[in-house]
Image (tube, rainbow, N blue to C red):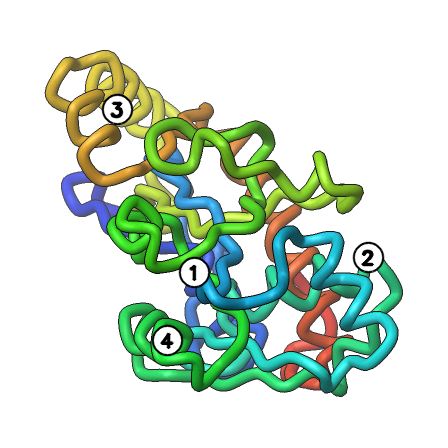
Amino acid sequence: MGDAHYLSIISTSTLASHILGLGSVNYTDIEPIVPLVTEYIVFAVSVSSPIKNFKELSEKMKANPTVLSFAIGSGLGNPNHVAIAAALKANGADVRRMKVVAFGGGKEALMAVLGEHVDVLAVAGSILVEEVKARKLRAIAVAAPRRLDGAFNTIPTLKEQGVDLVFGFSRYIVAPKGVSNDQLAYWESVFASLIRSEEWKNALEKNNWNSTYMTSSQTVKDLQTQYFALRSVLTELELAKVQQGK
């Protein structure tokens, strides 16, 4: 039986790493408790770019999948890469031919677009919020279920621009495999209280996070849905190493 005194955090990147063959841990190896936050992917371009919205970008990529370059952080196949591919594939672009430049992290990717070395940036909103506020970058879409608050409140969602996609970088609290149902219920209640606290609400606002709390059983289903969605896109990109199983 697992020891419920020890908790850890996994993320959307944990799932992607498993599919890419870079990590051995999958969501089936632990007991998910709750998701705490999701940072939805924001697409942005330089303020001097002629691209004004995601529909324009998508049409360009459909006509010529190598016409634009995309900056991401932390390696090919990461959630940002998947978000780009899923959004463009939905409009018929050949995502296997698109030009993606992977940097060491989101900030390095941001600097490449600011310097106009790469055309489009796709990262979590917290990475570029200050540049959007300062009008150094033009955010053209958010992969969120609805418009975000704060600096992104005027930025249309992908859905508003004809792409039925919601995609973000989520973080989950997990326990060791084998903890009891009573132990899971206890930790669910602890985090349910946390998300109602003023301190947590302030942290969400300060960090441009989105609360995505759900129960443990709902979290298992959410992780499974995400895993299969990630694997589908990564298979399309010919990056997936894990082709079967959960």
Up/down of 196 relative to 41, above or below: above
Q: Name the residue under label 1.
A: 123
Q: Which of marks 4 and 1 is nearer the N terminus?
A: 4
Up/down of 138 relative to 215, above or below: below
Q: Mark 4 points at which residue?
A: 109
Distance of label 4 from label 1 (alpha carbons) = 8 Å
Left-right relation of 54 to 215: right
Foreground tag (3 vs 4): 4
Q: Do the residues labelled 4 and 1 touch (CB within 8 Å)?
A: yes
Up/down of 245 relative to 10, above or below: below
The 10 Å Cα crowd at callout 4, few under 14, some 14 to 19, many 20 or more, is many
Distance of label 3 from label 4 (alpha carbons) = 34 Å
Distance of label 4 from label 2 (alpha carbons) = 24 Å
- Number of labels in the image equals 4
Distance of label 2 from label 1 (alpha carbons) = 19 Å
Looking at numbered disc 4 in the image, what kind of residue is underneath it? Ala
Q: What element carries label 2?
A: loop
Looking at numbered disc 1 in the image, what kind of residue is underneath it? Val
Foreground tag (3 vs 1): 1
Left-right relation of 232 to 201: right
Q: Is mark 3 on a helix, strand or loop?
A: helix
Q: Mark 2 points at which residue?
A: 90
Residue 205, given in percent of the width and then of the height, sits at 24, 29
Looking at numbered disc 2 in the image, what kind of residue is underneath it? Ala
Residue 38, given in percent of the width and then of the height, sits at 41, 41
Residue 66, given in percent of the width and then of the height, sits at 73, 86
The 10 Å Cα crowd at callout 2, few under 14, some 14 to 19, many 20 or more, is some
Q: Name the residue under label 3.
A: 191
**Which residue: 38% across, 45% down?**
178
Looking at numbered disc 3 in the image, what kind of residue is underneath it? Phe
